[in-house]
Image: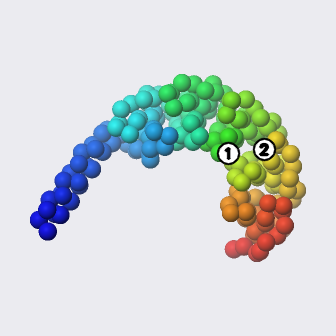
Amino acid sequence: MKYSLLLSALIFTLAGYGQAWTKQYDHVDDCICGLSLVGKGDKHGFVDKDGKLVVPLIYDDALTFSEGFAAVKINGKWGYIDSTGKTFVEPKYMEAMSFHSSFAVVSNGNDYGFIDTTGKVAIPMIYEGASNFSEGLAAVNRKGVWGYIDNKGKDLIPFKYNFAGTFDNGAARVMLSGKWILIDNTGKKIADSE
């Protein structure tokens, strides 16, 4: 009993000591791709698992790493960095999302499209809204209605929904004529949804 209490106290002490560096930041996110997003005041950067600053706190906003890249905002524009802090995509977008399935949603301020992991626009910015790829499909809005495209930008599920969510386990929640339903990856209704 004494040994288990002593061991518990030691583990608790070491766990607290290992995270002492977190107190110097206003927020610390989970460690993803070996780095944690940290913020102090209105600036953001990234540290490694030991709290060593890898990417300086120079960004106005940032998202956590995903698929080896992080969206960062500086001087009102979004771009991307790699895990060494090197600029991967110059800050030029008004909005940017994290990478999912090798694509990231970006916006020029009016329209949305997708860049790939080479940093090039893979699907043109022709949509009024877009969500991340999931299970090979992305919900996009064109002319006020939502539908789904594949990773080549080909329309797969017709544009007829008031809203469309991402796919999870073969189903997506969409709104059609003011009612929520679940559809499969062919657009076929599976069930009504709350």
Name the image quarter holding residue 121: top right
Residues 20 and 4: in front is: 4
Residue at screen point 21% across, 51% down: 13
Q: Can you give x and y, in whole percent of width and height, for residue 109 in the image?
A: 72, 36
Q: Amino acid at mark 1?
A: Ser
- Identify the disc placed on residue 183: none
Q: Is residue 124 left or right of residue 68?
A: right
Residue at screen point 27% across, 50% down: 15
- How many labels were placed on the picture? 2
Q: Is residue 29 left or right of residue 166?
A: left
- CA separation in Å, label 1 and label 2: 9 Å
Rendered position, 130 above or below 95: below
Rendered position, 50 above or below 91: below
Farthest-out residue, left: 2
Q: Is residue 140 left or right of residue 160?
A: left
Rendered position, 188 above or below 127: below
Instruction: Tell me whether circle 1 and circle 2 mark residues in contact (CB < 8 Å).
Output: yes
- Quarter holding the N terminus is bottom left
Examine the rendering and report whether any part of residue 74 can be seen: yes
Kindly identify which residue carries mark 2. Answer: 151
Q: Amino acid at mark 2?
A: Asn
Kindly identify which residue carries mark 1. Answer: 101
Residue at screen point 35% across, 36% down: 51
Q: Can you give x and y, in whole percent of width and height, for residue 154 in the image?
A: 86, 45
Pick whichever of labels 1 and 2 is earlier in the sequence.
1
| Mark 1: few/some/many CA within 10 Å (<14, 14-19, 20+) | some
SS at mark 1?
loop
